[in-house]
């Protein structure tokens, strides 16, 4: 892939991303030509610097100040925000909500998507209809999803409760109960986004050559054996990838939780994830210094989760 | 049902008759369960559409009735008469198209440089961008809003769009694709006297149409449905996108469920229509860009 890596003399540079100007490429005549590529990379680099790198660094600095959105300015307070954050029960409570949501939603989103893909792969004829039903919701804007599901969860005349009472079960106050609001949001999320994982699984299934199954069938393997001994093991890499993508996506919970609780975080903040707390601190409480510190905590969680998974999954693959 | 293709050779296993009897019910069971799942998945949408066709008085009737007694387009009329949804659709179209075009241009140029025209330090810069993939947009909202206030970009199209153009993962995907294009092609073009821009336009891009479509579709869907940043970056309802407008004005619609559902249906239509028209491309775009 990187066939030209050997032509780049900067591998050993230690002076940072762009600090290799002191390293002229051999022939002086070709200096201008050697830099031609920079012009092509420049527009993206500029946007990256202004809208990603700068806010990233500014956020780190802001987290060391008591800056407020109302007053502006703000003075240096050292690590005060960081130590306040570690002692703030609301930080840990919202982090717990995020982790709990991830633990509820990830297995469902992987298992249901896998079932959808396996079944769809078998029934070739209805392909377009199944893809539309399963993947369609993924294309809905989040506010459409929450409008529909808030309506479905409505007490009394909502569809979900009507179906429950219809089969003789008691009504559930889905979005008003402290114990049910997060599962309700998780169910909505499963409905909304399972289609994405479904498409990834379906693509992987279509990549398995048919002769593999035919050979197994010849050897007398039944459908169940073919599934557990051949298909699922062949999907292991895809599953690892989907689990990783899904966990990180679930850890980023905010939009649907915010909208389905009308921005309140639910009863006793039972559905306010860590990003919700960042949002409330920054835009309602206007304490952007403190909110920046929590943003960095969240970033650390994402990075650690990604690294742990990378470790776990790459180890699994080498041992098997 | 593709299982039929394995029918003949199974006699080798010595149970030709039993097999026929066994596979058919399995196939039927699979079809029935997948159809059941599909119906369950469609129910919320069907229910939303049916609700939107009811007069407000019928929506809260107990026990629940599926079909409207007196179907009416009154809810749609009311939503359209209010006018803000049309404005949000327009805003979403402008912003998503702008984000997609800008992303394609900027990321293609960068990926081309990293892949075909490396310069001193380019591998370091590329490594920095790769690290940028790890940064979730949610981490940046606070400092980015602070910065936008200073730049005077809050409540502008540019303020909503520009941060979404910074998609290092797209640079990565495009570079990987460009890397796979054999050097012979560019070298032949270079011998013919073509410059970098000519080579990009006449040689590399025509060979990259599938990945360009994938990146474009993925970016468009993402921009269309993006909520958090456009929500933070706009306070003026006239500049809101569909998800932000529907999300924040949701409360203002009050308890008019038929109108809520009519707005939801109208807000959902554009991407669903795109999907129905370009199903194959959308599926490929999402899997190609999503898998990498």
Image (cartoon, coloured by chain):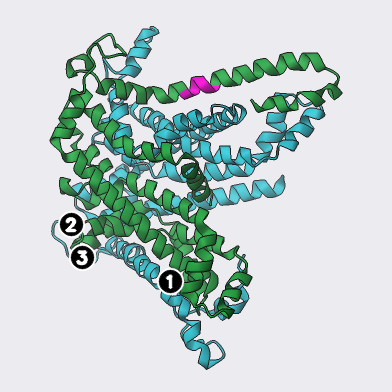
Q: SS at mark 2?
A: loop
| Residue at 66% across, 28% down | B2
Q: Residues within 10 Å of mark 3 (few under 14, many from 20)?
A: few
Q: Which mark is residue A41?
A: 1
Judge from the rendering whether residue B101 lies leftward or rightward of residue A284; answer left or right. Answer: right
Q: Residues within 10 Å of mark 2 (few under 14, many from 20)?
A: some
Q: Which residue is mark 2?
A: A69
| Residue at 35% across, 62% down | A52
User: What letter labels the chain drawn in green?
Assistant: B
Image x and y of residue A262, in percent? 23, 34
Q: Which residue is mark 3?
A: B151
Q: Which mark is residue A265?
A: none
Image x and y of residue A249, in percent? 43, 44
Towards the viewer: B167 or B210? B210
Pointers 2 and 3 within a single chain: no
Please say whether residue A71 is one of the residues in the magenta stretch: no
Whether residues under marks 3 and 1 lie with C-beta atoms below 8 angstroms apart, the answer is no
Per the rendered image, the range of residues in magenta is B34-38
From the image, state whether disc 2 or disc 3 is nearer to you.
Answer: 3
| Residue at 72% across, 16% down | B22
Q: Main secondary structure of the magenta part?
A: helix
Please say whether residue B37 is one of the residues in the magenta stretch: yes
The quadrant in which the N terminus of chain A is found is bottom right
User: What letter labels the chain drawn in cyan?
Assistant: A
From the image, state whether disc 3 or disc 1 is nearer to you.
Answer: 1
Q: Is residue A187 above or below residue A52?
A: above
């Amino acid at each position: 892939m990187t066939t030209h890596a050997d032509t780049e003399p900067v591998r050993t540079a230690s002076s940072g991303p762009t600090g290799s100007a002191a390293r002229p490429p051999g022939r002086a005549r070709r200096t201008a030509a050697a830099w031609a590529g920079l012009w092509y990379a420049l527009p993206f680099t500029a946007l990256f610097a202004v809208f990603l790198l700068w806010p990233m660094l500014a956020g780190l600095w802001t987290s060391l100040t008591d800056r407020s959105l109302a007053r502006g300015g703000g003075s240096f307070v050292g690590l005060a925000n960081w130590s306040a954050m570690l002692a703030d029960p609301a930080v840990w409570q919202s982090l717990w909500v995020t982790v709990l949501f991830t633990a509820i939603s990830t297995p469902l989103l992987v298992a249901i998507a896998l079932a959808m893909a396996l079944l769809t792969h078998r029934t070739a004829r209805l392909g377009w209809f199944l893809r539309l039903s399963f993947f369609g919701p993924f294309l809905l804007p989040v506010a459409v999803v929450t409008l529909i599901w808030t309506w479905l969860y409505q007490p009394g005349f909502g569809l979900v409760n009507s179906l429950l009472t219809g089969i003789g079960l008691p009504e559930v106050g889905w979005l008003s109960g402290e114990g049910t609001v997060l599962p309700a949001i998780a169910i909505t999320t499963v409905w909304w986004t399972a289609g994405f994982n479904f498409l990834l699984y379906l693509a992987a299934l279509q990549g398995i050559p048919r002769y593999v199954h035919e050979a197994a069938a010849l050897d007398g393997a039944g459908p169940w054996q073919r599934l557990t001994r051949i298909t699922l093991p062949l999907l292991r890499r895809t599953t690892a990838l989907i689990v990783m993508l899904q966990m990180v996506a679930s850890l980023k919970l905010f939009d649907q939780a915010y909208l389905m609780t009308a921005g309140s975080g639910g009863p006793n903040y039972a559905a306010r994830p860590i990003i919700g707390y960042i949002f409330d601190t920054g835009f309602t409480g206007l304490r952007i210094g403190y909110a920046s510190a929590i943003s960095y905590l969240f970033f650390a969680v994402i990075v650690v989760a990604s690294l742990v998974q990378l470790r776990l999954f790459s180890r699994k693959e080498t041992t098997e | 049902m593709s299982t039929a293709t394995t029918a003949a050779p199974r006699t080798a296993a010595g149970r030709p008759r039993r097999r026929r009897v066994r596979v058919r019910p399995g196939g039927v069971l699979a079809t029935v369960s997948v159809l059941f799942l599909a119906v369950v998945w469609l129910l919320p949408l069907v229910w939303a559409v049916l609700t939107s066709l009811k007069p407000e008085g019928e929506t809260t009737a107990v026990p629940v009735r599926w079909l409207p007694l007196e179907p009416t387009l009154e809810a749609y009329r009311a939503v359209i008469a209010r006018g803000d949804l049309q404005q949000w659709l327009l805003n979403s179209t402008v912003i998503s198209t702008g984000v997609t075009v800008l992303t394609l241009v900027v990321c293609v140029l960068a990926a081309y440089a990293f892949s075909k025209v490396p310069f001193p330090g380019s591998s370091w810069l590329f490594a920095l961008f790769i690290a940028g993939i790890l940064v979730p947009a949610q981490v940046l909202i606070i400092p980015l809003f602070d910065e936008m206030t200073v730049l005077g970009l809050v409540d502008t199209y540019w303020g909503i769009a520009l941060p979404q153009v910074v998609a290092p993962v797209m640079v990565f995907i495009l570079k990987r694709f460009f890397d796979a294009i054999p050097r012979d092609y560019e070298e032949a073009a270079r011998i013919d006297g073509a410059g970098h821009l000519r080579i990009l336009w006449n040689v590399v891009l025509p060979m990259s149409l599938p990945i360009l479509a994938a990146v474009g579709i993925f970016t468009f869907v993402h921009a269309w449905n993006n909520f958090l940043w456009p929500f933070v970056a706009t306070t003026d309802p006239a500049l809101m996108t569909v998800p932000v407008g529907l999300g924040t004005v949701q409360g203002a619609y009050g308890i008019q469920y038929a109108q809520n559902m009519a707005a939801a249906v109208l807000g959902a239509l554009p991407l669903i229509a795109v999907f129905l028209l370009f199903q194959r491309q959308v599926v490929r775009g999402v899997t190609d860009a999503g898998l990498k």
